[in-house]
Image (cartoon, rainbow, N blue to C red):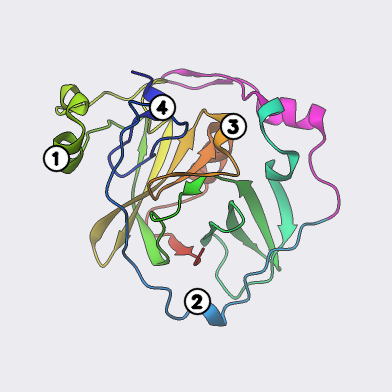
Amino acid sequence: MDMDNMVAEGGPMPEAAAPAALNRRSFLIGSAAGLGALSLAGCASSGGMSYSEAVRAYGPVADAKFPIAAVDISKVDPKYYRRTVRYPSKEAPGTIIIDPAKHYVYRIEGNDNATRYGANVGREGFLWSGEAYVGRKAEWPTWTPPKEMIARQPEAAKYAAGMPGGPDNPLGARTLYLYQDGKYTLYTIYSTRVARSIGTGVTSGCTGLLTQDMLDLYARTPVDTKVLVLPA
């Protein structure tokens, strides 16, 4: 079974169509109340990464636990390369804003600027919006399929005790787990090695960034960071 198509506990959903792709219940949680008043229309700054700059930015990483392969950026639309953009917002620096309609994740930097990352997001029927926060973080996390998934997809039973973290684990190298009112929402921001998934709606609710982008966001995101998920 191709592990890139596996569902992760509170993490990634299928990123490429495959007969054995595992699915998970939708995340119809949260509320969009209050989001409408925010000024959240991102405006790209002039310029951006050139192809050669992207090759360097998304090159291999010698991580402490497992080597991280370079991204095949030929499979990523250049508009999804990481960049600094003008993004007027009243949110505090460090706040993460997920815009599933545009397939972007923003980290507010202050002075009306943000770091913008290309993302994959939930497909139709697996989208939710509202306010959450980062309840915990994990490097090379273990994946454990929910009981509901095992009931629907018996092939997932072999991972019932958990799949250790590693390059083939669908949660990837880094994961941010989102919480509301002290409870895990089953929604995460995770790292994906599937370049072609960026800019698409292919998951069952979570948001995936290219691993090199996720390393950047993860390192600058402490627990309790506010996260806003916009309506799609």
> What kind of residue is marked 2?
Leu
Apparent side of residue 218 relative to residue 55 in the rendered image (left or right): left
Mark sitting earlier along the chain (2/3): 2
Q: Residues within 10 Å of mark 2 (few under 14, many from 20)?
A: some
Q: Residues within 10 Å of mark 3 (few under 14, many from 20)?
A: some
At x 58% / y 30%, what residue is drawn?
Answer: 195
Quick check: marks 1 and 4 in contact, CB under 8 Å? Answer: no
Residue range corresponding to the magenta coloring: 46-73
Residue beneath disc 1? 147
Q: Nearer the viewer, residue 174 or 19?
A: 19
For this rendering, which residue is in front, 23 or 71?
Answer: 23
Residue type at numbered disc 1: Lys
Q: Secondary structure at mark 4?
A: loop
Q: Which residue is mark 3?
A: 196
Quarter assignment of residue 118: top right
Residue matched to label 4: 18
Lower sequence index among marks 1 and 4: 4
Q: Nearer the viewer, mark 1 or mark 4?
A: 4
Percent across and percent down for residue 174 are 42, 36
Q: Which residue is denoted by mark 2 in the rendering?
A: 35
Badge 1 local density, few (<14 within 10 Å), some, or many (20+)?
A: few
CA gap, disc 2 to disc 4? Answer: 36 Å
Picture coordinates of residue 218, whole percent (x, y): 48, 43
Q: Secondary structure at mark 1?
A: helix
Q: Residue 96's spot in the image, x, y percent?
A: 52, 59
| Badge 4 amino acid | Ala
Q: Are marks 1 and 3 in contact (CB under 8 Å)?
A: no
